[in-house]
Image: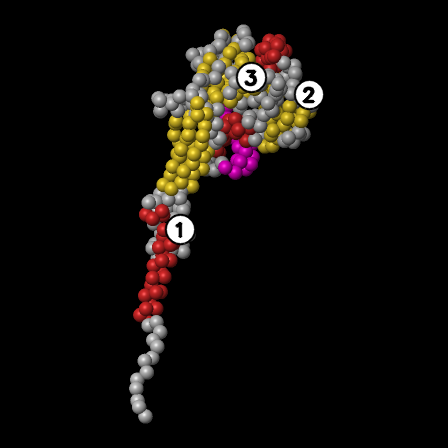
Amino acid sequence: MAGGTKRADKGIGAGAVFVLILLFIVIVIGFVVLVRNPAPAIRLKGDIKGIGAATLVQFEVSDEFGEGPRPWWKLWAPLRENSVSVMATVGRKTLPELHEGRASLDIVATNDSWGRFFRGGRREVTRDLPVRLTPPHADVLSTHHYINQGGAEVVVFRVSPGTSESGVEVGKLIFPSWAVKESAPDVRFALFAFPYDFGPATPIRILARDDAGNETVASFDYRLFPKKFHSGTIQVTDDFMNRVVPPIMSQTPGLVDQGSLLKNFLLVNGKLRAEQAQKLVELSRQTAPHFPWTGPFIALPSKVEAAFADYRSYVYNGQVVDHQTHLGFDLAGFEHMPVQAANDGVVVLADFFGIFGNAVIIDHGCGLQTLYGHLSAIEVKAGESVRRGQEIGKSGQTGLAGGDHLHFTVLLDGIPINPTEWWDPHWIHDRIEEKLAPYR
């Protein structure tokens, strides 16, 4: 039988399989490296409604490549994110060639990843915005502005269309304005304070700003009456500190024991007092955009133990250990005397409040609030509407009190002001009611 050789079919060899697998791995790695590289994220802060002379633009950029490279062999590992906040000013001041009309605001962020075939990830946010370069106007409508140091006053003015914010600037403080009536939002009034510790040369002026960031200031005629406030001495004893300090410390978890009774007293009288002053500013934001009251505020018929802005030196064992200013009236009558709401409003705080002990704060609208401290009992709750003369609690000696009395404070945007003006029906009529009446 004739013999011969038969050629056998050969499949893909092991070497070729290995090459194919390696090629596949390279393709996968390339896909992951080149594709799994997201661009940075851009998040605008606030609503930019236009570009003015100097409009502040704030945004945050977050990037998954901001904190160092991921190990090359851990392609599956989660990417680490980093973020940065950016503030920039755009407008005529930075671009003198800018004119009124419309402009495009472009924000571009890139990273140094291998995305887009080694060009880095890229994100762009674009806003088409109106360009407004003419600042708003504020025309003063009221007259006869008389301001007592430590007191308050009202100015009425009209703002031009497009004004988004306005108020009165006293030094570095800004007191916002409010519409005299809803149907005429361009006619505004600002109830502002001149703090007891501001110097007579402190400027007072109207401030107006539009939604593009254009800002203007307007002067108005006023007369300031400086005041000299009383100074006195408080004798601090161990008995007093032992009575008042531990309850305050126990109900204020943020206070750390300083290791001695005197140091704890100074902590309460200083640090806690300052923290509560800031808290009063925060509480002032819980205010109604109108006055729910009319007429003078109630003055509790009692003996005045301490007046507004009394400067106190605290003496312990013959040495002065502290200085503080008493920003209210201490009113004493009989033990646990009824305490009435000074005027109509809404309770924003009814709780233990540090140096004021059991306290109630009532909002009377437009940043105006009253504080009632050292109460032995609280008879209202936060969110409750109260009427002028309604009983809200009983006097006491909780908090930093030497005896049973009521601590009464009037606040404007969290700034303590002299209550005597608000007890005076003539002042209420002349300074507030008569100025607002023509525009209501």
**What amino acid is found at the position of numbered circle 1 in the picture?**
Arg
Callout 1: helix, strand or loop?
loop
Of badges 2 and 1, nearer the viewer stands 1
Q: Residue at x 58, y 28 (%)?
A: 286
Tell me the kind of residue under disc 3.
Asp
Q: Which residue is mark 2?
A: 389
Screen quadrant of the C terminus: top right
Task: Between residue 365 and residue 91, name the one nearer to us.
Answer: 91
Residue 152, image x, y percentages: 54, 15
Marks 1 and 3 sit apart, C-alpha to C-alpha, by 53 Å
Dot 2: within a 10 Å radius of its alpha carbon, few (fewer than 14), some, or many (20 or more) residues? some
Q: Secondary structure at mark 2?
A: loop
Q: Are marks 3 and 2 in contact (CB under 8 Å)?
A: no
Relative placement, left or right, of 172 versus 308 is left
Asked if 154 appears above or below 355 in the picture, the reply is above
Q: Residue at x 53, y 23 (%)?
A: 413
Query: Does the magenta-highlighted stretch encompass residue 246?
Result: yes
Identify which residue, 272 or 399, lies in the foreground.
Answer: 272
Write the residue at 36% across / 61% down.
Answer: 24
Residues under labels 3 and 2: Cα distance? Answer: 35 Å
Mark 2 or 1, nearer chain start: 1
Q: Which residues are magenta?
A: 234-254
Question: Residue 237, position in %: x, y?
Answer: 51, 27
- Residue holding disc 3: 186
Q: Amino acid at mark 2?
A: Gly
Q: Within the image, what quadrant is residue 77 found in?
A: bottom left
Q: Main secondary structure of the magenta part?
A: helix
